[in-house]
Image (cartoon, helix red, strand yellow):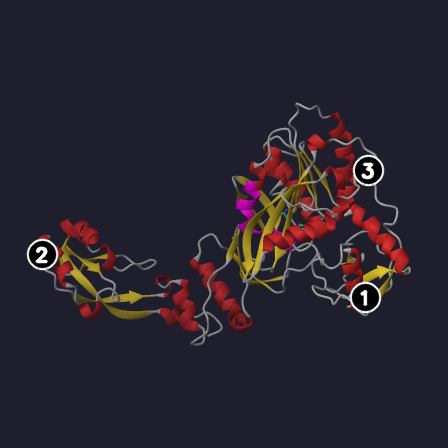
Amino acid sequence: MTVLDREAFKRTVVVPALKVKKEIVHHVLKSLKQSVLQRPGLKRVVEDPEDEDSRFVILDPHKVPEFSLGEAKQQVLRQLSVHPEVCRYQLELSYENFKSEEILRAVLPQGQEVTSGFSRVGHIAHLNLRDHQLPYRHLIGQVIMDKNPGITCVVNKTNIIDSTYRNFEMEVLAGENNLVTKVKENNISYELDFSKVYWNPRLSTEHGRIVELLRAGDVLFDVFAGVGPFAIPAAKRSCRVFANDLNPDSYSWLLHNCRLNKVDTKVRAFNMDGRDFLRGPVREELSKELPLLKEEQKTAFHVVMNLPALAVEFLDVFRHLLVGEPCSPAALPTVHCYGFSKHSDPARDIQERAEAALGTSLAGCCSTVLVRNVAPNKEMLCLSFQIPADVLYKRPCPDEGQTFQILESQSHQCPAATVTNKGISKGLRYPMQNTLQQTEISAEDQALQQETGKFRPYALVAKRIPPRSAALYVPSKARQASLALTQSFDSDY
Ligand SMILES: C[S@@+](CC[C@H](N)C(=O)[O-])C[C@H]1O[C@@H](n2cnc3c(N)ncnc32)[C@H](O)[C@@H]1O
């Protein structure tokens, strides 16, 4: 069946039942709670057409096999003066009386995995069907809509979530073609177009956890704000909020939700790339506010970066961000940076990638929280740390930003390029996300390393040409120059 035929579920079945006097029905129900039939839309107690003083208590045939109650239950019934003999009752069943799993199991080919799991976003049920279920997708959608009050639209993901804006293409399987919905999270309402923006109901605890860290008067910079699930509750706590999203639709819904929740005067919204936001409004605000802070003032500055596939790669922006400004070591901003990891030690993995981007060690001054398991062997984590003063205020070393030449490349399409200090790490200790994880170090370099105890300054650049590949760069100059570079890099990292 690929089109739902509700009539096909109409049938008459013979089930066990107990005939009892109507005065003691509730005692019997209480004593036989485990054996009474529980079905959507079915009465457990029905009238006896031949005896208006009696009722039939319908029992579950799976719990009362062969129409016989066990000795213990018979004893209980005798104490209630009920004759424990089970009779046969003809029960009319229809589509309404079946659970969604039962319907799907009945209509999908035998042996096929039945799934009726979905996430709910307002009136929308959102499925992620497997290939073998696709021929039955409309039927599955219809069953889910029928069986879940309040769901009036069922959609299926049609691609994996790898768009820039983290939304995904979807097909409406059943119900109205209306993807503008209203959701409530941690007592705050949001409106959004689910086809155009990112919303994940599984992040509510994490949103709440971060917001709990904020106090009135604190400043929150939300680099990848979406429709506002960090920004709006933070503003409700009387924080000053700078919220940004590159997606123009997210930006519009963010503004809308600020108005909806009456915090539009507390949230400044931006529609730009995260790097530009950090280098522009965030830098400007930190330069203005940090030097004015008095010792006794407890204002904290938080930066939230929830774009787990990429956020770690944005951390290099903090390097030298406040060069030339008076250093305020008492009020260094705290970053909460999200990342995915498939590593056996995900916390170490995300910390090492962050250290590579920042060019400094975070040992002993960061913490990691496991946010959720995204897929088998794939975790989402949040790394929190105060940005070290050296990272923010130290001048870049003069060699950074010079031209390198590709010595060896994993990606033959990578052009020779000018690489900035972005992604440069010592040797191969910190391969960047999505780049080569292992590359052989040449014998010459190994000798150099043993001789000097130092690594040659490889730069791993996460250029996505082609996607998910990277090139390995070394300085273009001769060994002498490269050694000199090693010294200067080492002093900086
Ligand atoms: C995973 S969502 C998180 C949204 C929201 N913070 C939340 O917790 O639900 C990431 C957001 O980053 C935005 N985004 C993607 N690339 C960006 C970039 N380069 N600069 C700024 N925002 C970006 C997407 O549009 C999306 O709304």
Q: Secondary structure at mark 2?
A: helix
Closer to the camera in the image, 384 or 265? 384
Closer to the camera in the image, 110 or 142? 110
- In the rendered image, residue 79, in percent from the top left (x then y), is placed at 9, 53
Residue carrying label 3:
323
- The furthest residue to the front: 451
Name which of mark 2 and mark 1 comes first in the sequence. Answer: 2
**Residue at screen point 81% across, 33% down:** 325
**Depth-wise, is mark 3 or mark 1 nearer the camera?**
1
Residue carrying label 2:
78
Name which of mark 3 and mark 1 comes first in the sequence. Answer: 3
| Magenta stretch, residue numbers | 194-209
Q: Amino acid at mark 2?
A: Arg
Disc number placed over residue 314 in the picture, else none: none
Indicate whether 185 appears above or below 477. above
Q: Amino acid at mark 1?
A: Glu
